[in-house]
Image (cartoon, rainbow, N blue to C red):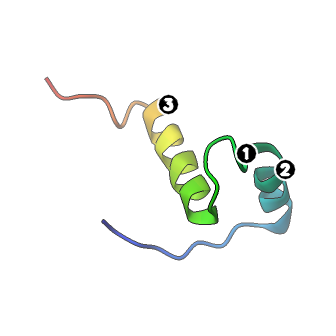
């Protein structure tokens, strides 16, 4: 597993805390990971090979 440090603008983080905390994760890192995975899935990068 790769670990990275990211910076998120205050306005975007306020939205994340108000709208997503508790829905897609509890911890900050869990929320950001789920946002990234949802984006990659939506764009088709996580499709099963076969």
Q: Quadrant of residue 44?
A: top left
The vertical placement of 13 against 18, above or below, is below
Say which element carries label 3. helix
Q: Residue at (31%, 29%) from the top-left corner?
A: 47
List the residue tagged with mark 2.
18
Q: Nearer the viewer, mark 1 or mark 3?
A: 1
- The secondary structure type at the circle numbered 2 is helix
Residue 20 image label:
1
Neighbourhood count class around disc 2 (C-alpha, 10 Å): few under 14, some 14–19, many 20 upward: few
Q: Mark 2 or 3 closer to N-term?
A: 2
10 Å crowding of disc 1: few (<14), some (14-19), many (20+): some
Residue nearest the viewer, comparing 23 with 1: 23
The CA span between labels 1 and 3 is 17 Å
Decide: few, some or many residues near mark 3? Use Cα within 10 Å; few <14, some 14-19, many ≥20. few
| Residue occupying image coordinates x 51% and y 55% | 33
Cα separation between marks 1 and 2 = 6 Å
Q: Quadrant of the C terminus?
A: top left
- In the picture of the structure, the residue carrying the numbered disc 3 is 42
Q: Mark 1 near mark 2, Cβ–Cβ under 8 Å?
A: yes
Note whether 32 is above or below 24 in the view shown: below
Left or right: where does residue 18 sit relative to residue 39? right
Mark 1 secondary-structure assignment: helix
Question: Looking at the image, is mark 2 or mark 3 nearer the viewer?
Answer: 2
Q: Residue 15: percent from the left, percent from the top?
A: 82, 51
Q: Residue at x 84, y 50 (%)?
A: 18
């Amino acid at each position: 597993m790769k670990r990275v440090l990211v910076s998120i603008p205050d306005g975007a983080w306020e939205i994340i805390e108000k709208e997503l905390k508790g829905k897609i994760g509890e911890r900050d890192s869990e929320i950001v990971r789920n946002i990234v995975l949802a984006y990659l899935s939506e764009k088709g990068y996580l499709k099963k090979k076969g």
